[in-house]
Amino acid sequence: MDIQTSRSRGGGSSETREKSYDVYLSFRGPDTREGFVDHLYERLLGQEVRVFKDDEELVMGEDVGASLRRTIRLSKIAIPILSESYASSRLCLMELAQIVEYHKTTGQIIMPVFFNVTPSVVKNKSHGYGEAIARHRERGIDPDTLRKGEEALSYVGSIPGLEIDR
């Protein structure tokens, strides 16, 4: 399987090549990394699916935000694994906002997994999700970033997905 795609062609002797993925996994590590995410990742790899998982693929020293945005853009499917503390991570909210943006502009597929949370909690930002948003506000997270994250939660909470109760 070819795991490289050409980003730009022509205009010089060098060609920029970036890795593309079939699946981008977005998750809050402490909730799901050991267990669900690791098992999902291994099963997908076993089916020869090219999967991005941050602890396996991120390049140290690289701008994480830019790297994740690029990787999301170069993935065919995004699987956000929305767990109890997903919204408490500013990075997860930024990832989800980017996933929703690419979905709306390119038709990228979003396959949400609701892990120990219901879609309505995510959509309505209730319970722990509402508390996480309030903490972000108190900490002074950029209002535009927070707004985009909240909109992405509402959007993804409206998409049918897999619900897992553990």
Image (cartoon, rainbow, N blue to C red):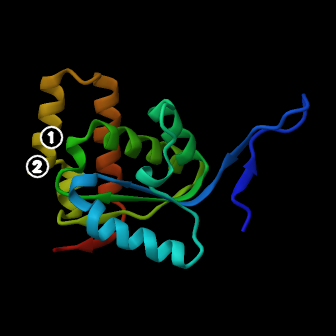
109 vs 79, nearest the viewer: 79
Q: Quadrant of residue 84?
A: bottom left
Measured as percent of width and height from the top left, residue 90 is found at 28, 36
Q: Quadrant of residue 82?
A: bottom left
User: 103 left or right of 130?
Assistant: right
- Kindly identify which numbered label has been placed on residue 128: 2
Q: Is residue 59 above or below residue 32?
A: above
125 vs 32, nearest the viewer: 32
Label 2 – label 1 distance at C-alpha: 6 Å
Measured as percent of width and height from the top left, residue 131 is found at 9, 41
What's the residue type where badge 1 is placed? Ala
- Whether residue 112 is visible, yes or no, is yes
The structure residue drawn at horizontal position 49% and vertical position 73%, both measured from the top left corner, is 44
How packed mark 2 is, by other alpha carbons closer than 10 Å (few <14, some 14-19, many 20 or more), is: some
Measured as percent of width and height from the top left, residue 123 is found at 24, 53
The structure residue drawn at horizontal position 58% and vertical position 64%, both measured from the top left corner, is 50
User: 65 left or right of 164?
Assistant: right
Mark 2 in CB contact with mark 1 (< 8 angstroms)? yes
Q: Which quadrant would the N terminus be assigned to in this image?
A: bottom right
The residue that label 1 is drawn on is 132
Q: Is residue 159 above or below residue 125?
A: below
Disc 1 secondary structure class: helix
Q: Is residue 74 above or below residue 115?
A: above
Measured as percent of width and height from the top left, residue 56 is found at 46, 54
What's the residue type where badge 2 is placed? Gly
